[in-house]
Image (cartoon, rainbow, N blue to C red):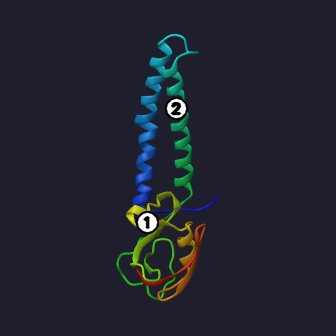
Amino acid sequence: MPTNFLTKEGFQKLQEELDHLRTAKRQEVAERLHEAMEGGELIENAEYEAAKNEQAFVEGRIQELDLLLATAQIIEESNGKSKKHDAIQVGSKVTIKEGNFEAETFSIVGAAEANPREGKISNESPIGKAILGHKLGDVVKVETPGGTYNVKIIKVS
């Protein structure tokens, strides 16, 4: 099974979602199904179909979260201490600069909690893959579907 990298915060959020789905959401969907079945002819009952579809989605998401959390490896996020001698890894906070563009800072996280708007990029993204294992000062070639470019690693913490 592949390892899923999660921060403590990401693990907690997914665990809370799983708990909600198992308790409140399952019960809510079961009640909708019960009400729809009492509504008469099931063959033409749109509410029944919608409830069955939602039930399938909820059960699928529960299975997905179960597997994700079972294979999760908790990563330690940077606590502000310098890691100049260490290679970039999942959990590192990195600042890079591409050419004349402004420097960008982000954290490397697992794919399950990547959110570029929050400054969290996946270790599986083109830039995440490219900079993993590199160190402060390295110039790294990033290959994307839109082309190739170089970035310089200017800070690692």
Most foreground residue, 136 or 44: 44
In the picture, measured across the screen, residue 103 lies left or right of residue 54, that is: left
Most foreground residue, 77 or 45: 45
Most foreground residue, 65 or 115: 115
Mark 2 and mark 1: Cα distance apart in space: 31 Å
Mark 2: secondary structure: helix
Q: Would you say residue 112 is visible in this rendering?
A: yes
Residue at the farthest left position: 80
Image point (43%, 30%), residue name: 27
Q: Which quadrant of the figure contains the C terminus?
A: bottom left
Give the crowd class for mark 2: few <14, some 14-19, many >=20 residues within 10 Å. Answer: some
Q: What is the total number of numbered labels drawn onto the structure image?
A: 2
Q: Which residue is label 1 attached to?
A: 120
Give the crowd class for mark 1: few <14, some 14-19, many >=20 residues within 10 Å. Answer: some
Q: Position of residue 70 (x, y in %)?
A: 55, 54
Q: Which residue is label 2 attached to?
A: 55
Image point (50%, 32%), residue name: 54
The amino acid pointed to by label 1 is Lys
Q: Position of residue 57 (x, y in %)?
A: 53, 37
Q: Which quadrant of the figure contains the N terminus?
A: bottom right
In the picture, measured across the screen, residue 90 lies left or right of residue 104, that is: right
